[in-house]
Amino acid sequence: MVPLVAFQLLSAALFAIGIYGVMARRSAVLIVMSIELMLNAVNINLIAAASHLEGTGRWANFDGHIIAIFIITVAAAEVGLGMAIILRMYRNRSTVNVDEINLMKW
């Protein structure tokens, strides 16, 4: 059995890569992909913790799995909405560079 620390290190590494992607990238599509990477890192951590830790109650061993399914559902809705907004911005401004999009500025 793989120890829990290995999954936590993998999750931390993926989360750090996602944060770097959000902070360093200028393309809105790459920022959305980095956010998805961070959400998947959280899912890995939740599922690994749920499978390694003993709990009490009826759904104790599946709590991480259930929360991960909710995160996947919210992430799918977020990607759909985010890509629709990005597509609309590209049609209006012909760019997806977040530095060049100033729709909210006066």
Image: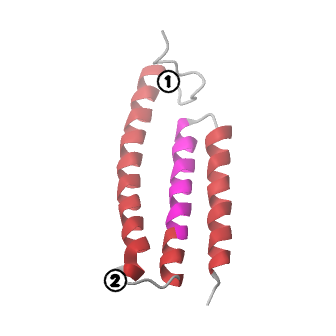
Residue annotated with mark 2 = 57
Which residue in the rendered view is the most extreme toward the bottom? 1
- Hey, what amino acid is under mark 2? Gly
Is 29 one of the magenta-colored residues? yes
Sequence-first disc among 1 and 2: 2
- Hey, what amino acid is under mark 1? Ser
| Quadrant containing the N terminus in the rendered view | bottom right
Residue at the location (39% across, 29% down)?
88
Is 80 one of the magenta-colored residues? no
Residue range highlighted in magenta: 28-45
Q: Nearer the viewer, residue 31 or 87?
A: 31
User: Is residue 79 placed above or below 53 in the rendered structure?
Assistant: above
Residue 70 sits in which quadrant? bottom left
Real-space CA distance between mark 1 and mark 2, rounded to the nearest whole angstrom: 54 Å
Which callout, 1 or 2, points to the residue nearer the camera? 2
**Element class at badge 1:** loop
Which residue in the rendered view is the most extreme toward the front? 56
Q: Position of residue 69 (x, y in %)?
A: 37, 66
Q: Position of residue 50 (x, y in %)?
A: 48, 77
Q: Position of residue 6 (x, y in %)?
A: 67, 76
Which residue in the rendered view is the most extreme toward the left? 58
User: Is residue 34 placed above or below 6 in the rendered structure?
Assistant: above
Residue at the location (57% across, 49% down)?
34
Residue at the location (37% across, 37% down)?
84
**Element class at badge 2:** loop
Q: Which mark is residue 94?
A: 1
Q: Is residue 10 left or right of residue 28?
A: right
State the count of labels. 2
Dominant SS of magenta comes to helix
